[in-house]
Image: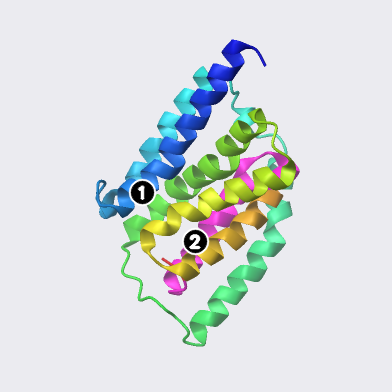
Amino acid sequence: MNAKGKKTSVFLLFFICIIYIGLPLSILAGLIDFDYKFYALTIGSVVVYGVFRLLGFSNADMGITFMNTKKSIIHVMPLTIVLVIAGVTIWLLGYSRITPNEKWSFFIFYIFISSPVQEFLYRGSLEAALNKFKLPYWGRMVLSTALYSFVHIIYRDWLTLVLTFAIGLIWYFCYQKTKNLIGVSISHAVLGVVTIVAGIIN
């Protein structure tokens, strides 16, 4: 790796730490108001997109593509259906942990903005960045999933961390099959709404 490549790698590592570790910690510490968490992550994703494009990453590198769209949806659909049924069953059996109080406007934002943004950050752009460091498949999978789970530390709930890590591994695997964010974004939106309404996780 030449000097320019090393500088780019150092900058990329520093940038990842700021966005993927610094941002959640800022929310946790109250430096960023908890009520604005989704807006902060959305702004963060815009910054990530701009910086990554300047660094030479293409949209396709970050999973922003229509190639393999049908395959990406079909690939994640069976698992999504199974988990939706499980979530609804838990809710019907009265095992809710949290009483949801979100308004309908939150769910619109969650479905059309927050879910795609989270998938872009933790499956698309982060995977593209980690590829630059020549990490093995399992290393990229564990690190990107751990960072996805870590952002949920703001809820101060251990079960949320465990469940997001588990589903993060599955979404990572599904994304790797097509390198298309559409399927996992739809799955994220559907499962997120179900688990929130069912009071399973925050």
Mark positioned earlier in the residue sequence (2 or 1): 1
Type of amino acid under label 1: Leu
Magenta highlight range: 175-200
Is 184 part of what is drawn in magenta?
yes
Determine the main secondary structure of the stretch shown in magenta.
Answer: helix
The quadrant of the image that shows the C terminus is bottom left
In percent of the image, x 59 and y 27: which residue is there?
Answer: 59
Q: Tell whether 139 sits left or right of 57.
A: right
Q: Quadrant of the N terminus?
A: top right
Q: Residues within 10 Å of mark 2 (few under 14, many from 20)?
A: many
- The residue nearer to you, when weighing 67 against 14, is 14
Q: Is residue 20 above or below residue 61?
A: below
Residue 43: x, y in percent?
A: 36, 36
Q: Compare residues 20 and 45 and report the one nearer the observer.
A: 20
Residue of label 2: 192
- The answer to which quarter of the image holds residue 139 is top right
Which of the 4 image quadrants contains residue 125? top right
**Nearer to us: label 2 or label 1:** 1
Residue highlighted by disc 1: 25
Evaluate whether residue 63 shows in this view: no
The x, y position of residue 20, in whole percent, is 46, 42
For this orientation, the residue located farthest to the bottom is: 93
**Drawn side of residue 84 relative to residue 47, left or right:** right
Give amino acid for label 2.
Gly
User: Where does the image place residue 77, in percent across and percent down from the top left?
Assistant: 68, 58
Point 57% across, 81% down: residue = 89
- Residue at image position (59%, 46%) is 144
Q: For mark 2, give the secondary structure.
A: helix
Q: Can residue 182 be seen from the camera position used here?
A: yes
